[in-house]
Amino acid sequence: MPLSNGSRIRLLDTTVILMIAVLLGMIIGPALVERGELDASSEKHALADGPKPAQVDRMTLQPPKTILLVGREVAFLWPDGREDILPMEFLRANSPSAENTGESDLFGRVHGADPRTAFPGVRVEGYEKVGNYGLRLLFSDGHASGIFSFAYLQKLGDAFEARGEEPADN
């Protein structure tokens, strides 16, 4: 069924409004980021007071020397001698994937985030190196879309340590 003239005009108006919104986002967005009024980060996570993406030094760009899946934890040994031992459930809760954290629209509204903040019993069953910057952790609940940059893994280590929790006994 062909569109009436009124429907064509409404469709055209909607298209023009969307194009203006996109252009405004492209113009205003960088200015807000520069002034610190908008978080340009793409790594949102379930840990509210946890790590925030920041400038990273060359050490954080290097892959861990050793990765061990031990009981309910993943142990990372970094080239500088640092060790991070993180619970698998903590890693799952802080997966940086859009499936877990949602995706922001032009107005900063988040859509599609998993509302769960805890994943009891979830285990890391394996991992894959992604490029020269991160790992894809393969979880027992089928989740495998989160790419954990090496810098983000170290920030998670800092956040977990700041919580004052000791790694679980295995």
Image (spheres, grey):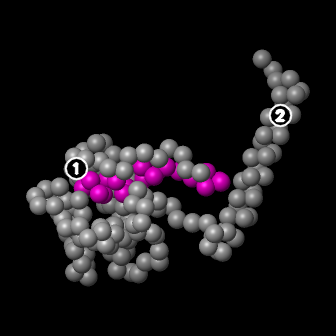
Q: Amino acid at mark 1?
A: Arg
Quadrant in which residue 141 is drawn:
top left
Q: Secondary structure at mark 2?
A: helix
Picture quarter with the N terminus = top right
Residue drawn at point x = 86 percent, y = 23 percent: 4
Local crowd size for mark 2, using a 10 Å CA cut-off: few (<14), some (14–19), many (≥20): few
Marks 1 and 2: in contact by CB < 8 Å? no
Residue drawn at point x = 22 percent, y = 50 percent: 123
Residue drawn at point x = 86 percent, y = 34 percent: 9
Q: Amino acid at mark 2?
A: Arg
Q: Position of residue 62 (x, y in %)?
A: 33, 75
Q: Is residue 169 visible?
A: yes
Q: Position of residue 130 (x, y in %)?
A: 36, 60
Q: Is residue 77 above or below residue 113?
A: below
Which residue in the rendered view is the most extreme toward the left? 170
- Disc 2: which residue: 10
Q: Which residues are magenta?
A: 88-108
Picture quarter with the C terminus = bottom left
* 75 sits left or right of 133 in the view: left
- Disc 1: which residue: 123
Q: Is residue 150 visible?
A: no
Quadrant in which residue 59 is drawn:
bottom left
Residue drawn at point x = 36 percent, y = 50 percent: 117
The first of marks 2 and 1 along the sequence is 2
